[in-house]
Amino acid sequence: MIGTGITEFGELWDSSFRKLGIGAGLAAVEDARISADLIDAMYVGNMSAGRFIRQEHVAALIADYSGLARDHIPATRVEAAGASGGLALRQGFLAVASGLHDIVVVGGAEKMTDVSDMESSMIQSSADDQEWETELGATFASLHALIATRHMHNYGTTREQLADVAVKNHSHGSLNPKAQFRRKIDRNVVLKSPIVASPLRMFDCAPSSDGAAAVVLCPLDAARKYAETPVEITGSGQASDTLALHNRKDICTMGATKVAAERAFKMAELAQKDVDVAEVHDNFTISEILAVEDLGFFPKGQGGKATEEGRTSFEGDVAVNTSGGLKARGDPIGATGVAQAVEIVTQLRGKADKRQVKDADVGLTQNVGGTGATVVVHIFRRA
Amino acid sequence: MATAPRFWRENPSRYNLVGFKCNSCGKYNFPPRIICPSCRRKSVGKMEPVKLKGTGVIFSFTEVHEGMDEQNVQKPYVVAMVEMDEGAKITGQVIDCDACDLAIGTKVRTTLRKLSEEGSAGVIHYGYKFIPICGESTVSPDK
């Protein structure tokens, strides 16, 4: 990875989808100090531009407005709900690793606030089983609430521990100038916020966001030509699971996270203890608790306790969501997986300023689609 | 919300809880599946439509306050994942109850209710919801 770019995340009334996509892409290409002529291909992660802005065919759109139409580069949209960005990164990685392409730009973008909150909520739920979950009354948040209720029942995870995920990620987000929410909160803010789907409250949920992120990839042996501190993708794992939550073997374990992580760690020839900094998919507070367990950082059932004890904060065993995560940095769905990679590269380059993890050498991203039917895990190392 | 044909084609399962039993391994699949996820190709031609009894226990539940179309639900409402007696797990609403009276392990049975409608003059969609069976409560084994 030789360049990164990211827009501000938030309710960006004056920014269109294409403006966001180009903003992130241009920043990444400038950061990589490459000429646009060198770009061989582009992959764009996007969940639902068709419903958010009634525009499909968005990879060609971004390539066009980035001035790449005259070179006729292959531009491919990648979709796997919330995991679209991470999956786009994996497609770019595979394209470079295969030798087919040299310089690849991977972007992710979503424009969510041109529709009402209700419409946005319905679009997000299209990641779930429409026939057998949504039609029967289940919302995206309510399915995560079912996970939370059961996790509390099985393992004694507390309401306060869920809140601690949001408190930590807001604290981290307060140090990230690109974050959507840059204000610290305490437990009471979470515990007194309106109920969305019990036990989850408003401050357990990531917001709707507009935003885009992009990275530039090239073969490892050429990376030093472009970047002082290139970052190597040392492992990439992807896994699927049943679309509907009720068909999972165990709703308190995201099987696809476990398998994607196993595959990525095996490829990287690294272990959990090697990871200094991780960006995980905290679209709900319970999701981060599952993530830190299923990635193997903590035993099953201990994610809440580990969070409460500060073991996932800056000073902890592994710094989780230093960007503020989906909760505080924001969650423009298709951009999220790429934004996670941008944060890890920033950390491994030592450029994370006030939120810098000391001597960060190995980083990990975990990007989830739906309630866990697609998971992508990447492992990164300073090259 | 779904259009009328999209909804109607699932009516046997939505009205009568028709799932598919795999006669290779004996597992009940609900919602219906053409291929058994355990036996895969061995199950081809061996999937038999079977009506579930309609009773089970709450595996997990939540009271939903936000995020569903106002027109189709009165908020708050309860959504549960129910483990049916045949072993399949099903997601649906629990009605005629207060969320505070429910627990993991509460026994429920299905009932036919209105799920949604396509506008004020449109087609009404019906399907299963759950009702607690009073006075009987067991704790489901942790799985």
Image (spheres, coloured by chain):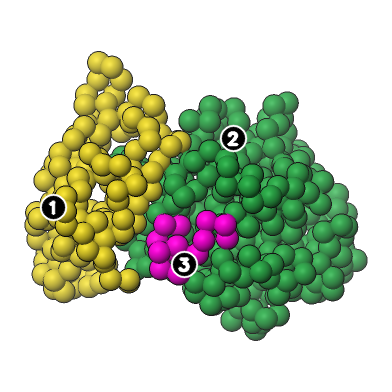
Chain colours: A green, B yellow
Where does label 3 land, which residue? A156
The kind of residue tagged 2 is Met
Q: Is residue A151 magenta?
A: yes
Which secondary structure, mark 1?
loop
Q: CA distance from mark 1 to mark 2?
A: 40 Å
Residues flagged by tags 1 and 2 on a common chain: no
Where does label 2 land, which residue? A112
The crowding category of the residue bearing disc 3, from other C-alpha atoms within 10 Å (few below 14, some 14 to 19, many at least 20), is some
The crowding category of the residue bearing disc 1, from other C-alpha atoms within 10 Å (few below 14, some 14 to 19, many at least 20), is some
Which secondary structure, mark 2?
loop
The residue lying at 50 percent from left, 54 percent from top is: A369
Percent position of residue B134, x then y: 16, 50
The chain identifier of the residue carrying mark 1 reads B
> What range of the chain is rendered magenta?
A148-161
**The C terminus of chain A is located in which quarter?**
bottom right
The kind of residue tagged 1 is Gly
The residue lying at 29 percent from left, 24 percent from top is: B118
Q: Is residue A114 above or below residue A138?
A: above
The chain identifier of the residue carrying mark 3 reads A
> Residue B43 or A143: which is nearer the viewer?
A143
Where does label 1 land, which residue? B54
Q: Is residue A7 left or right of residue A325?
A: right
Q: Is residue A230 left or right of residue B30?
A: right
**The N terminus of chain A is located in which quarter?**
bottom right
The kind of residue tagged 3 is Gly
Q: CA distance from mark 1 to mark 3?
A: 30 Å
Percent position of residue B90, x then y: 26, 54
> Residue A194 or A345: which is nearer the viewer?
A194
